[in-house]
């Protein structure tokens, strides 16, 4: 690639389509539309895979010559010319199965960076298009159609495409499950057509998995086929979610003990405390999340972690992998999150099923930036785990000039994965898909996004997009890009239809804490909220605002000005012993008003476990204390307030889908609307001043609320729109969410 030149002139014409003959084509079918069942679909004759690669180039209208230069022709610019074909350029290649980096060369000039919405491959210093040639010596699946009717009839038509050998499907080998129940499909072996029909007994998730081999015993590619589907009372979109972050080790201990003793020589606060998957399942079955309106559980990383204690950010203390970010296995769940009666894998399956039965989605936290040095990858391929330099050391800054944000290692025992190595990329992406399939989850959080090359996130998303095109339920991929108040542009650098759906709204965190935890002005909060809305623009609904998470001191402790040490000593004003009632109410008021804001703005709000009962904590690991399950009167008061707000968000569509509009504001009094159109409007009002106030708020005619009375969902107050105004009366530190008539 030494002769690479950039083809800037033609850049806009290079949104080329590169397709492969013989690759499955998946016509997308909509779900939940109550359409006809699978019996009416004509799936056509038997199909045999053909793996001739057809390469199309849709640019270069005025070009004299287009060639393709890639790994398969030793980057020879002249060896592989394309021919003019229906206004574009085309060629056919016969290649062994594999991924080949390539670029188009137009009139002797190499194209520049590949279009970001296509599979790519790094070769040396350059990112190229990836030509993916599948293995046609194995059969594959095609989804002709799939749907879940309004009454819960799950139907699908699948096609078993023969390998190049032409061998037909072996009827004995066919295994189909729908929502973990074995189902006998109607099979036409001569055409490879499977028709599936299953009446779901209740709302929940009804994933189709299908496995089959041909008469030579060769299993179809990607067996079992994974087609996640839901049946729900109302159509779900991700902005209907309220997310809740659970630290599994610190949430609920179902058996009163960790299955393995704590790691030696590690302080208790950074050691295993015994929380487990069954504890989360128990909370699900107690209705703990339903009562708060929570329907998306972000689990701290579920993968098996090392059992070794290491020195971490505090050199005087050791830590364990209780947090899950020191993975040693790509597919197995943590042993310690199991219990005496069942292992981690079995308990995690139970957890996911218990969640899905209740309409609760589960999000896996994927740690892809690095692995622990004892990871299976490092055993198999020591070269993948070669050490670089430790982030923050001299000559190895986290970021900035001379920084190494992509390849520095977080710690010497955490080798950094280099996704410009295509073997690593392929293995990790395959494992991510296998993990999601194994536990049937349709949401992932990408840890440390800004410390990885875009290629890993793009490739995962493009794979998920393919599943969606096959008729699978929509996925949600959210990233963590830890930035300050003005980090919107870096956040948006990773957000696209072919990368992350959205990210956590770190830029809004500071303003939220400044206003509700401190003495900041609502005007500042409004300006910063509007800025997030402007920067995220059409992707706003995918981003996740929050009051706190596992990497920063707890909101309560910050608001009370007593953030202590990572290794403890921060008072838990809500939970421990007799407390000054003034302190307690200060916390209840500040936290609940913070939640009132969080749960009434656009996006997918995140609740960090324990914040709903005012759990205290300093920096990591003190911010990850064990969740308390016995609450005093003040903790219950806060919890009830959060539950009321969470349920209101779930019940009131404008709070999730409406556009936001400021109606009245000063430093301490704030009113805004969420407008879903046609008079479907919620109005949120809050007063954080020291005394009761009464404010006349002008209601724009566009909200179509003339004459309507709206009731507060969290109090007995109401407002009536008269002469284009409402009179809002609120006590000190009172908030109200008005809706209905
Ligand atoms: Ca336990
Ligand atoms: Ca472990
Ligand atoms: Ca990295």
Image: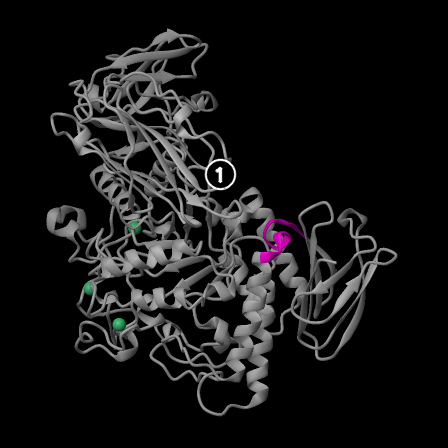
Horizontal and vertical percent position of residue 519: 62, 74
In the image, what residue occupies the spot 38% across and 84% down? 569
State the residue position of label 1.
32
Return the residue found at the far right: 723
Looking at the rendering, the quadrant in which ligand 2 lies is: bottom left
Quarter placement of the N terminus: top left
Q: Is 291 placed left or right of 521 in the picture?
A: left
Q: Does residue 654 show up magenta in the picture? A: yes
Q: Position of residue 561 (x, y in %)?
A: 51, 80
Image height of 146 relative to 678, above or below: above
Residue at image x 43%, y 14%?
60
Answer yes or no: is residue 310 visible: yes
**Kind of element beneath mark 1:** loop
Q: Nearer the viewer, residue 177 or 326?
A: 177
Mark 1 surroundings: few (<14), some (14-19) or many (≥20) residues within 10 A: many
* Magenta span of residues: 651-660
């Amino acid at each position: 690639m030494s002769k690479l030149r950039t083809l800037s002139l033609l850049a806009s014409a290079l949104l080329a389509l590169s397709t492969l003959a013989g690759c499955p084509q998946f016509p997308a079918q909509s779900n939940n539309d109550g359409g006809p069942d699978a019996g009416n679909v004509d799936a056509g004759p038997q199909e045999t895979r053909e793996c001739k690669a057809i390469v199309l180039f849709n640019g270069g209208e005025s070009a004299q010559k287009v060639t393709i230069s890639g790994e398969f022709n030793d980057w020879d610019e002249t060896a592989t010319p394309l021919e003019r074909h229906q206004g574009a350029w085309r060629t056919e290649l016969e290649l062994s199965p594999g991924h080949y980096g390539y670029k188009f060369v137009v009139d002797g000039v190499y194209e520049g960076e590949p279009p970001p919405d296509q599979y790519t491959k790094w070769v040396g210093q350059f990112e190229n298009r990836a030509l993916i040639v599948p293995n046609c010596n194995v059969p594959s699946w095609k989804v002709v159609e799939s749907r879940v009717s309004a009454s819960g009839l799950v139907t699908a038509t699948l096609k078993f495409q023969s390998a190049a050998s032409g061998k037909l499907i072996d009827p004995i080998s066919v295994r189909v499950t729908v929502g973990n129940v074995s189902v006998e499909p109607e099979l036409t072996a001569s055409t490879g057509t499977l028709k599936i029909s299953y009446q779901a007994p209740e709302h929940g998730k009804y994933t189709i998995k299908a496995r089959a081999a041909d008469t030579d015993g060769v299993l179809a590619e990607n067996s079992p086929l994974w087609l996640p589907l839901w049946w729900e009372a109302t159509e779900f979109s991700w902005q209907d979610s309220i997310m809740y972050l659970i630290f599994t080790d610190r949430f609920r201990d179902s058996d009163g003990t960790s299955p393995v003793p704590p790691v030696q020589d590690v302080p208790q606060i950074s050691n295993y405390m015994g929380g487990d998957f069954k504890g989360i399942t128990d909370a699900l079955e107690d209705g703990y999340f339903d009562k708060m309106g929570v329907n998306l559980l972000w689990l701290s990383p579920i993968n098996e972690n090392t059992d070794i204690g290491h020195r971490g950010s505090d050199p005087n203390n050791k830590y364990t992998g209780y947090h899950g970010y020191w993975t040693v296995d790509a597919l197995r769940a943590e042993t310690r999150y199991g219990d005496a009666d069942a292992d981690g894998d079995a308990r995690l399956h139970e957890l996911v099923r218990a969640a899905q039965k209740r309409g609760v989605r589960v999000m896996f936290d994927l740690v892809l930036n690095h692995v622990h040095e004892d990871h299976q990858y490092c055993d198999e391929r020591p070269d993948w785990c070669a050490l670089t330099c430790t982030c923050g050391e001299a000559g190895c800054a986290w970021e900035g000039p001379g920084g190494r944000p992509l390849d520095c290692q977080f710690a010497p025992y955490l080798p950094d994965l280099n996704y410009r190595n295509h073997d690593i990329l392929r293995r990790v992406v395959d494992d991510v898909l296998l993990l999601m399939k194994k536990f049937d989850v349709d949401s992932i959080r990408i840890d440390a996004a800004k410390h990885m090359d875009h290629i890993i996130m793009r490739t995962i998303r493009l794979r998920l997009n393919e599943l969606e095109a096959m008729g699978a339920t929509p996925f949600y991929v959210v990233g963590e890009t830890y930035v300050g108040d003005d980090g919107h542009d870096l956040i948006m650098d990773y957000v696209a239809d072919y990368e992350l759906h959205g990210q956590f709204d770190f830029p809004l965190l500071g303003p939220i804490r400044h206003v509700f935890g401190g003495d900041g002005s609502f005007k500042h909060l409004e300006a910063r909220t509007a800025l997030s809305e402007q920067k995220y623009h059409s992707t706003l609904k995918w981003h996740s605002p929050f009051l706190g998470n596992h990497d920063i001191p707890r909101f309560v402790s910050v608001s009370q000005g007593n953030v202590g040490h990572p290794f403890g000593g921060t008072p838990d004003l809500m939970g421990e012993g007799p407390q000054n009632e003034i302190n307690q109410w200060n916390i209840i008021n500040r936290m609940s008003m913070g939640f009132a804001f969080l749960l009434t703005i656009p996006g997918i709000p995140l609740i960090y476990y324990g914040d709903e009962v005012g759990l205290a904590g300093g920096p990591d690991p003190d911010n990850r204390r064990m969740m308390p399950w016995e609450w005093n009167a003040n903790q219950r008061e806060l919890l009830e307030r959060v539950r009321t707000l969470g349920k209101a968000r779930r019940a009131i569509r404008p709070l999730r889908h409406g556009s936001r509009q400021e109606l009245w504001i000063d430093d301490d009094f704030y009113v805004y609307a969420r407008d879903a159109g046609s008079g479907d409007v919620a109005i949120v009002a809050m007063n954080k001043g020291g005394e009761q106030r009464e404010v006349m708020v002008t209601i724009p005619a566009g909200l179509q609320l003339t004459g309507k009375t709206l009731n507060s969902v969290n109090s007995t107050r109401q407002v009536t729109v008269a002469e284009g105004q409402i009179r809002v009366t609120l006590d000190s530190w009172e908030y109200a969410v008005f809706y209905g008539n």
